[in-house]
Image: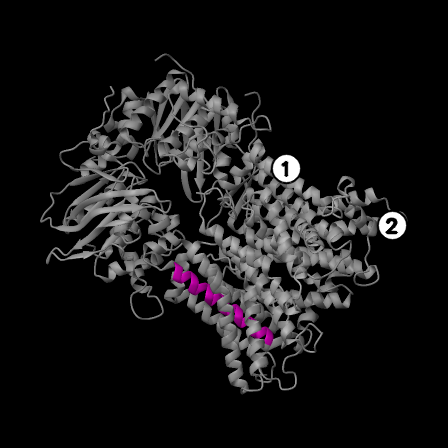
Amino acid sequence: MEEKTAVIKMRNITKSFGSVLANDKVWLDIYKGEILALLGENGSGKTTLMNMLSGIYYPDAGQIFMGENEVSIRSPKDAYDLGIGMIHQHFKLVDVLTAAENIILGMSGKGLLDMSAVNEKIRSICSLYGFDVDPEQKIYDMSVSQKQTVEIIKVLYRGADILILDEPTAVLTPQETDKLFAILRNMRDDGKAVIIITHKLHEVEELSDRVAILQRGRFVGDTLTKDTNAAEMTNMMVGHPVVLNIERPEPENVKERLRVENLTIRDIDGVKKLDDVSFSVGSGEILGIAGISGCGQKELLEAIAGLQPAESGSIFYIDTKTGEKEPLIGKKPREISAMGVALSFVPEDRLGMGLVANMDLTDNMMLRSFRRGKSVFADRKSPRELARRVVTELSVNTPSVDTPVRKLSGGNVQKILVGREISSAPTVLMTAYAVRGLDINSSYTIYDLINQQKQKGVAVIFVGEDLDVLVELCDRILILCGGKVSGIVDGRKTDKREIGRMMTSLGGESSEQQA
Amino acid sequence: MAGILSLVQAAIVFGTVILFGAIGEILTEKSGSLNLGVPGIMYIGGIAGLAGAYLYESSVSAPEPLLCFLIALFCTLIASCLAGLLYSFLTISLRANQNVTGLTLTIFGSGIANLFGGAMNKMAGGVGQISVSTTSAAYRTTLPFFRGISVLSSLGVLVYVAVILAIVMTWFLNRTRAGLNLRAVGENPATADAAGIKVTKLKYIATCTGAAITGLGGLYYVLDYIKGTWANDGGIEKLGWLAVALVIFARWKPVHAIWGSYLFGVLFWLYFYIPGLDRSSQELFKMLPYIVTIAVLVISSMRRSRENRPPAHLGLPYFREER
Amino acid sequence: MNSKLKEPFVRITKREDTPLLKAWGIRLFSLLLALITCAGIIYLIVKLNPLKVYVAMWEGAFGTSKRSWITARDTMMLLCIGVGLAPAFKMRFWNIGAEGQILAGGLATAACMIYFGSSMPTWALLIVSFAASCIAGAVWGFVPAAFKARFDTNETLFTLMMNYVAIQLTSFFITKWENPIGSNTVGIINQSTKAGWLPSFLGQQYMLNVIIVMTLTIAVYIYLRWSKHGYEIAVVGESERTAKYIGINVKKVIIRTVALSGGLCGVAGFLAVSGASHTISTNTAGGRGFTAIIVAWLAKFNPLVMFFVSLLLAFLQKGAVEIASRYDLNDYASQMITGIILFFILGSEFFINYKLIFRGKKEVN
């Protein structure tokens, strides 16, 4: 690679939120015609740093240079004017507007809109890079990967030549990821600077030319990707060497615990979310569930938990001693627990569903227990003790048990939620995206907790998105595709390519014959 | 037949007051601000127009109608715009709760208007003695080319202004760049912000312009509807709340507000035109507009269409660095 | 780039955990600022020494024992409504229909007084009126709550419309109960027998009002803070999805809470009719349903803090009426002053929750 000068230089960038120092004197250089991977654990300040480049946040201290000039990026508009565009992890799209309307949002130009000219230009960008999007389609009708495409077009439409993508592959299948990477390479060859924020090492190795690493808000260093390796990067990321192996104890004494038969569910708009799903889970094993986001995982777990009415089919809870079957379908959560079924559920949306963000630890522990007893007053003593116990046993980092959970970091929030859910000695444990957004250490704490439950004879259902984790942790993996069961595979005998294929086509037997 | 004609006419006059309120509030709500200060702003707009006209008319011997018209209009626009500015400053810059700020604005507006209205009445020599006849006449002048047409024969100029404003507003929201940006702000300010839209500025402009339009409702009420007088009877307040209800009835679409407002007018005056009602049944009939609004609320909440929903971020404050 | 852009002049950052004392200091300071502003405005209007004006206000509210008791009565009225609204607001149900719920309660009381005034002993009549007003208010809350629970119908506008339905219903009954005929008012009900009037207690006409409202206030405080229902209300208010997740029957909680809220507002109607005016008119609620919303919100839905906010507002109102009558203004001056003071207090919350950072790193607290 020939000598290049950095198009953007970030120097001594510092940003804090309240008492949390998110970025501490960070240096970063960005070059054109190069794909830079910004690597770091969850919570290491990658997104914050890039948000300051895209004008969402303003640094507390430090300078940003564009070429030789110091610039001040006070708003996203300033960023666009400098040719910087960012594709956020949570898409910034207005649901009720069309793709085209979203793409031109906020751009200057004639007061009167000429949508047909806009559509024309979008189509030409699409054909240039190989996107497939209808400019007149409303966002709420789109799939996740279509929405991501709209976001990318939005940035290109504005003529950005520095593109930042925040964890772009989190919501994509391996096949969609390949397609995206091809497009990003196209853009690099086009002379654009591409930055992807990621915590996945194999993506760094596969895609990037250069890698820059952040650790707890501090810049650790940057290097050409070809000059480094996974072990070295991990050490830089975590600060100490880690063993990257998830334990998988052999399941013992597996007996059928929960059986789902021909389950079909429609949502409010009448769309089929689950279609004729059947499977069973045994005590002492982990059943993984894989699938593209939004293809029925949420509905499945909620149906078992009694939160989602089903159109047809049945769910049975089986007493492992007597073999008696109890139907769960049509029962409310309270009725299910009244039947003596100890079902724990760690939902995807921790602060919006599993916990109450504004309540303290004690009150959140109370969620499961406040009804106990005949008194009109709620017992706060035992939840308080439980909170204390969870804090010590799972080493939750919190000032006290009277702190609102919204002030805690993602890992600590998840420890509290999982701690509460397993405290009731469940026989069935369901988790949805249990390690999303967690740093490596917290993730391993959660895997350990789940494995402990498995060894205690709990039937565990683990809905995951990271196929590497699913393949390493689960005994069996059920793959959903468009609400149907695409297949159930043995975790020890499969690999993520196979699962990826099954996620996109039923049974994985598609006509996909690309190079 | 004559009864129906005069009912329609009364309905249009009534509807015009709340139509202004509703158009202003639609613009405001499209930017994500739920301004419950509509009655207060109407009060402020009304009293400012009246005061301006009164001061001018009582200071010259032969007031010029056109000047009367412009002075009252100017005073109303400025005063109600200032009320909108106050609301904007508190809710947008200082991020105060929108509902509470709006209600406070209503209390404040009704207080200040009735205080000065009462004082002007007293200066003029007693309740109902205030007279701005020239201004009122100017506002109630029928446009020349509508004079012959029966229903339209006695409608003042602001009636047409309201209809035109509603149409212009629809065009603005759907066909212009600024309108698109505004809708995005009300739906999802974080997205609009990331797209480079100046969220705060746009919200300020929409809320203040909306307030100015709402204020015109008060002006029309004072100078046309009650013919240039003042009464401390809470009439404006009731109409102000109906304007807020009309926004929902019209599903945030200004053209629907046009016929909606006239329908409200018909419902409001219906008791007057139904023969043989005694006083007590009349009172029950006066519930109609409110009952119908409730019915519309319920029906529209039963049909969950994605297109007829309120702006998604309505009523919530926006702070860019929120985590 | 041709020119270097400047750092923004002022930036805002969120602040967590402002000490309680400082928070109240900020609020008090804003109140002071508001009073100074009001004094300025009053001076502009009536050209009187503002200090004298405030002395007059003090005399108007607390000048004599009788006035103090009337101020106390009005404080209790506001407090009762505010306390009634608290459960609904804590659940994030924007009940702005207190006005109608008060009227419904007042109508029920008036009906009891008129129809049973001569056939029941006073104590029984009082109990029946109290219960009837409570039920009437609860019904007025139940209707929008049921639709909210079932169809997620916007409660703000529903409750608002219910106010006007109640007003028209009151007008309807006024034509039925007119006394004397043609006056379009109900007149003082049971003027000679005083049947159904809340009696004096411990030698004070309004002592019972105080006792009833203070009891309710403490009861609601305990209910919200320590009962299982109170906890459910808090969870539903914070997150309906969490509530469903742990098996709370959200619909039931919404309906139960808003009916309770309406019932308490109905009691305020009982106090207004049986315990104060002894008549009913479309002005019986008199905008207090709206003022109480602000009371409840400023107190952060804490019933005990509401007492002080209510006292402040009742004082302002009585004081302003006094200035109005002394200096030949009308009563609406009080609404204007109330509005200004509330604007200041509303604005002050910003300085409690955020801080400003000016260019050049100087932080302003």
Vertical side of A123 occupied by A169: above or below = below
Q: Position of residue A400 (x, y in %)?
A: 35, 54
Circle 2 marks a residue in which chain?
B
What type is the residue that disc 1 sits on?
Answer: Val
Q: Measure how far apart labels 2 and 1 are at the Cα level.
A: 37 Å
Does the CB distance between marks 2 and 1 fall below 8 Å? no
Q: Is C253 contained in the magenta span?
A: yes
As helix, strand or loop, the secondary structure at mark 2 comes to helix
Vertical side of C352 occupied by B195: above or below = above
From the viewer's side, name the closer residue of A482 and C318.
Answer: A482
Q: Is A131 contained in the magenta span?
A: no
User: Which image quadrant is residue C60 in?
Assistant: bottom right
Residue at 28% over, 60% down = A334
From the viewer's side, name the closer residue of A412 and C356.
Answer: A412
- Check residue B168 in the rendering and tell me which mark sits there, or answer none: 1
The image's colour scheme reads: one colour
- Check residue B59 in the rendering and tell me which mark sits there, or answer none: 2
Vertical side of A279 occupied by B228: above or below = below
Q: Position of residue B157 (x, y in %)?
A: 74, 44
Residue at 42% over, 29% down = A150
The magenta-colored residue range is: C251-273
Residue that lies at the very extreme toward the top in this rendered image: A2
Whether residue A147 can be seen here: yes
Residue at 61% over, 48% down = B87
Which is the main secondary structure of the residues drawn in magenta? helix
Whether residue A247 can be seen here: no
